[in-house]
Structure formats: C-alpha cells, structure tokens
Amino acid sequence: MKKIVTVFLCCLFALIPLSACQKTDGGLKKIRVNEVTHSVFYAPMYAADALGYFEDEGIEIELTNGGGADAVMAAVLSGSADIGFCGPEAALYVLIGGSNNVPTVFGQLTKRDGSFLVSRVDEADSFDWATSLNGKEILAGRKGGVPAMTFEYILNENGLYDGQNVSMNYDINFNYMTAAFESGTADYCTMFEPVASEYEKAGKGYVVASVGEASGEVPYTCYIARENYIEKNEDTVRGFLRAVMKGIDYILKTDSETGAQLLETYFDGTELSSISTSLTSYKSIDAWQKDMTMTEDSFTRLQDIIDNAGELEKRVAFADLVDTSYSSQIYAELFADEKN
C-alpha cells in the first residue's frame, strides 16, 4: 500500500512545477528541508546550522518535520519541500513504480540503523543474537518499514524467523513502542537515542546491542531532490553538502559534552546529559557517512534487506537513483589531505 500511494503521489505531482529557492530578507537563499523525524541521530545537520555553516554558503534552511518517509517524499514531489531527508527506499519505490518523476539521492548522512536493542534484563555481557532472542517477542517497528525489515534481516542472518523461533510484534505504532514495552508488551524493544539511554538510566531496561552494528552499513538517511531542482540549483546543492559535511566533521572531532551544548536549543526538553550520551553512542557505532557519498555495496545491502522482507518488486541499478558526483567533489575539496 505504501508503494502504491507513493507512486500515485508521484504521478499526481509530476505536473506541478517546483518553486525556485527564494531569497530571505537577509539575502540568503532559503532551502526548504523536510526531515523524516527530528533526532539526535541527525546531529551533524543541526550542528551545521548552529555553527553558521549554511549561512557561510549563503543558505538558510527552513526545517520541517515530515513524520515519515512517505510524507517527506510527497513534499518533495509536490514542490512544498526543496530537499527531502529520509531513507532512500522512498525514492526507490517511486523508481520501481515506473515513474519518470523520480527524485535523485545526492547525499547520505547516516550509514547505519540508529536504534539500539533494549532488554528487560541485564545481559549486556552475555547477549547473543542467535541465542538470546530465541523464543522471544520483539517490538521493532511497523511491518514494511526499514527499521523492522533491518531487524528481520539480522534475525534471519542468525537463524531466527518470525513465527517459527521468534515473534516480531508489528501491532504497535512506532511512536508508542516504548510505552507499550514499559507496560509489559514483548521481551525486547528497539529504541533510538536518547530514549534508549534515558530508559536504561531510569532503571526500566538495559541496552544490550546496536542494531546498526549488527546489520552492517546501510544508506539509512539521505538527502533527496527532484532532478530539475538539482540542475537549476547546483551551486546551492554543493553549498548545502559542504555545510553538512563540515557539521559531520565538527561532531566527530568535538567531545560529546561540547557538542551537546551546541545542540541543546534544537532539543527542547531533553537533558543536556542525554544529548551528550546520544552523541557518544552514535560515534561509537560509526553512524555518519563522513564523505556523504553512498556506496554501491551499501545500496545493495539495502535492497537485500527489503528483498528479504518480501517488499522488493524488482532490483534497480545504483546509477538510476543515486548521484555521487556532488558529494565526492565537495569531500575532495574539503578533506584532500585527510583519509576517509
């Protein structure tokens, strides 16, 4: 159903022209960015904004929360967003649907699933994917969503199959999984930071594994835009990538406490210590793609994951969806003297 809706939206909005970037009162070019959700997982982008890296490029970003990849893709296709920030599978489904209005993935921020597996019992030193989850019930997201499909991929790699020797509970909406787990549903639950650390800090559960480490590198969250937008705004696209790339570099080279202080205003209501812990957690699993360039191997793994879940109608070629030329160029310019 998700794929059908996405293709329908693509066809519906194909005839709607994409508005060009508008100048702000300060002379900056405004870019409307629609993000899949607001998370510390995306810290480098917020750091780039806080440090003035976008402004240095003559850009002001207008950030809105799409609340899901489908909504982000619809915003890009309709022209209500210039750049979409979500999983590349949203564009993949549009391409598979046969549309001639397929957005292009031009940059990648995260290269792993950002969730952590939380258990009701302390087994951090003894947890094993193949044995600990055998016969257990797990909350890992909605069926057909990349988080759930990635988790299923890990289970299958460890000889575990839903309905046979493990139970995947798909009945709980993503936003309510933690509450359901706390109320007694399932034996394990996946949580993003800072929720996972805060949950453990409160003594409600224990973080036992990183989903992203177990699955390997996957192009988890990327920047996507319509081809004609990129063609008409190449300098702006380069400037955008340059700013985010500098943000990644800053977060990686800065201690988590200092980084948390910079990001505090972006996460109203979240304790400074929780932001700091989240940054440390994501650094520890090598969460961010420093050169923002998707690899064909990781794209293949994403298709493996979707195919394994029975949600991939056909394979597509890397070059038909992804343009790595801009990110490769900017990375070479910024970090010519550094090794990736």
Image: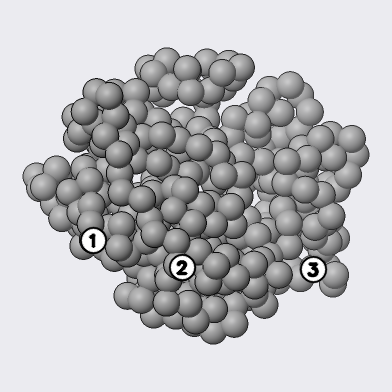
Give the labeled residue for mark 3: 162
Label 2 sits on a secondary structure element that is loop
Task: Name which residue type carries label 3.
Answer: Asp
Mark sitting earlier along the chain (3/2) = 2
Q: Residues within 10 Å of mark 1 (few under 14, many from 20)?
A: few
Mark sitting earlier along the chain (3/1) = 3
> In percent of the image, x 31 and y 49: which residue is there?
20
- Examine the rendering and report whether any part of residue 157 can be seen: no
Task: Name which residue type carries label 1.
Answer: Glu
- Report the side of 250 relative to 197 (left or right): left
Residue 144, percent across and down? 68, 65
For the residues labelled 3 and 2, say whether their Cβ atoms are less than 8 Å apart: no
> In percent of the image, x 53 and y 23: which residue is there?
267
Give the labeled residue for mark 1: 231
Comparing labels 3 and 1, the label whose residue is closer to the camera: 1
Label 1 sits on a secondary structure element that is helix
